[in-house]
Amino acid sequence: MTSKRQHKNSVITIVATTIIVFILASIIIVSAVAKRGPQLTVVTAESSKAKLGENVWNPFEKKTKIKINGIIEPKLSLQNNFKISSKKADVIEFLQSNAVTNNDDGKLEKLDFKKLRNFKYLSSDNQKLARKTNSIPYMVEATNIIYDPETASAVDFLGELWDQANFQKIALPDSTLPLESAMIYMGDDYVKYKSTSSYVGHSIEDDGNPAFGALKLLQPNAKLYRNMADLKKQFETKQINMAIVDSTTAITMRQDNPKLKLSVWGPDNYANYRMLSIVKGTKNKAAAYKYLDNRIAQSVQSRVSKTMNELPVNQEAQKSDANFSTYGLDALVTLDYSYLNEHRTTFNKRWNEIFV
């Protein structure tokens, strides 16, 4: 009888001990999580995780104690109507075209702009774009031309681009890049310029027929590129002597090859934006707002302009390249991606029929 009682007491002791150990372990785990602080998953199209960590994520973590789980998604840098299909992301950084698509699909959190202290430093056009898309512009990619001065001349306004005496071979973006959309606008504006001798419009008319008619005139001397590596090779091998590029590419290419010159168009420059969005349903909304506000802060914008060649949207930020020191964000042409996305398949097909 005593032996049975002792066995029963032993079993109770073991069970009690197990429960206590489990409770203590749970307390330790909860304490560790609480001590570690909140985490934020940021999915981005930026190509360099190291540079993002050094210039954006690490300083943000140090300042806020919010841990960044950064994920690089190359597809976000392509003009492919990327749709959010995963709940893993809290914040997503992607192209303006994709921000429009996902906002239209109800995938983005409706933003409360009063929670963003740095929102007031965006231009009125950028604020309008943010309200329309529930996304914050954090970088502008202006449309520029780089050229080899030994064999090509500067192109200082739209009409000169179609003066083929200026160049022998020009590099144009392929249909996966957002600059394709800027080129379609450019073609339409060129037709208006030719017929009115004034630079007016900034819209695509007649289902893009005038635009593609103008672009077809460039085809005999055009070569497509997909990325910066393509461009470097094309310039080095003399396949091209001029290229239409975004501002980040222009700055980087000229750093690598100072011989290249840059034509910066003034008011009427076509702009694509990189956008920040909070994914609908995130459980880390407060941390997400802090990240958005930090990304457009003057200090961060000035730093990434210098270290990552990104043109800032914060109007108080310093621009690293003197060639862009005087451009005004309200003078840039904001592309209508609701229209462009609606016609994406047709426009890509027509582009490829001309240039591929």
Image (cartoon, rainbow, N blue to C red):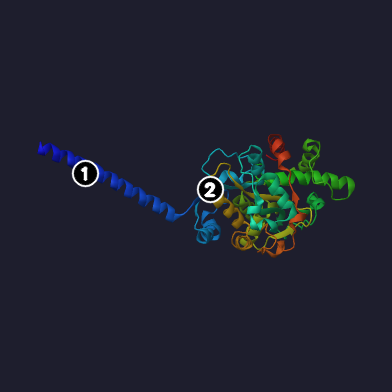
- Please report contact status of discs 1 and 2: CB closer than 8 Å, yes or no: no
Residue 102 drawn above or below residue 57: above
- Camera-nearest label, 1 or 2: 1
Could you tell me which quadrant the N terminus lies in?
A: top left
Residue 134 screen position, x and y as percent = 66, 46
Residue 252 screen position, x and y as percent = 63, 58
Which residue: 81% across, 36% down? Answer: 206
Could you give the CA–CA distance between mark 1 and mark 2, rounded to whole angstroms?
42 Å
Q: Please count the marks in the image.
A: 2
Instruction: Tell me if mark 1 has few (under 14), some (14-19) or many (20+) residues whose alpha carbon lies within 10 angstroms of its own.
Output: few
Quarter of image, res 174:
top right
Dot 1 or dot 2, earlier in sequence: 1
Q: Nearer the viewer, residue 147 or 336?
A: 336
Quarter of image, res 295:
bottom right
Q: Which mark is residue 13?
A: 1
Question: Disc 2 designates what residue?
Answer: 284
Q: Is residue 143 left or right of residue 201?
A: left
Residue 37 screen position, x and y as percent = 46, 54
Q: Nearer the viewer, residue 114 or 200?
A: 114
Could you tell me which quadrant the C terminus lies in?
A: top right
